[in-house]
Amino acid sequence: MYAFIKVAGRLGAIIALITLIVTLLRQLIALVGTLLFLIKFGIIALFAGLVLVVIFSTLRTRQRRRREEEEF
């Protein structure tokens, strides 16, 4: 009876370790996925901001040129 409990304890410990490793790997995969999403979102936001800055610069330059033409 004692041998059976000892073997069951070892198997239980091995199963618990495997379960912990699988759970930690799932959490790590979720963390990496979240970080990749945030990086991609940041890149897209920066690109959109850059496009807006270029558009506003272009419109401002056109407006200045029109004012200069009207002054002459």
Image (cartoon, helix red, strand yellow):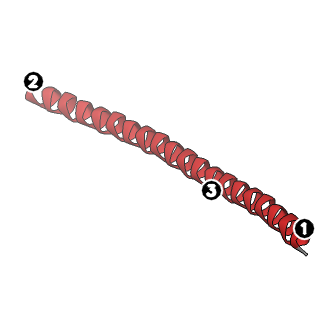
Precedes in sequence: disc 2 or disc 3: 3
Tag 3: amino acid: Gln
- Can you identify the residue that label 3 sits on? 27
**Amino acid carrying mark 1 in the image:** Ala
Tell me the element at label 2: loop
- 72 in relation to 35, above or below: above
**Can you say which quadrant of the picture contains the N terminus?**
bottom right
Q: Residue at x 74, y 61 (%)?
A: 19
Residue 72's tag is 2
Q: Residue at x 32, y 37 (%)?
A: 53
**In whole angstroms, how far apart are the C-alphas of marks 2 and 1?**
103 Å
Query: For the view shown, which residue lies furthest in the left direction?
Result: 71
Residue 56 lies in quadrant? top left
Q: Which residue is mark 1?
A: 3
Above/below status of 30 relative to 2: above
What whole-number distance in Å separates the C-alpha atoms at marks 2 and 3? 68 Å
Tell me the distance, in whole angstroms, between the alpha carbons under discs 3 and 1. 36 Å
Disc tally is 3
Where in the figure is residue 35, as x and y percent of width and height? 53, 47
Q: Are marks 3 and 1 in contact (CB under 8 Å)?
A: no
Position of 24 compared to 53: left or right? right
- In primary-sequence order, the first of circles 3 and 1 is 1
Residue at left offset 59%, top offset 47%: 32
User: In the rendered structure, which amino acid carries the disc numbered 2?
Assistant: Phe
Q: Secondary structure at mark 3?
A: helix
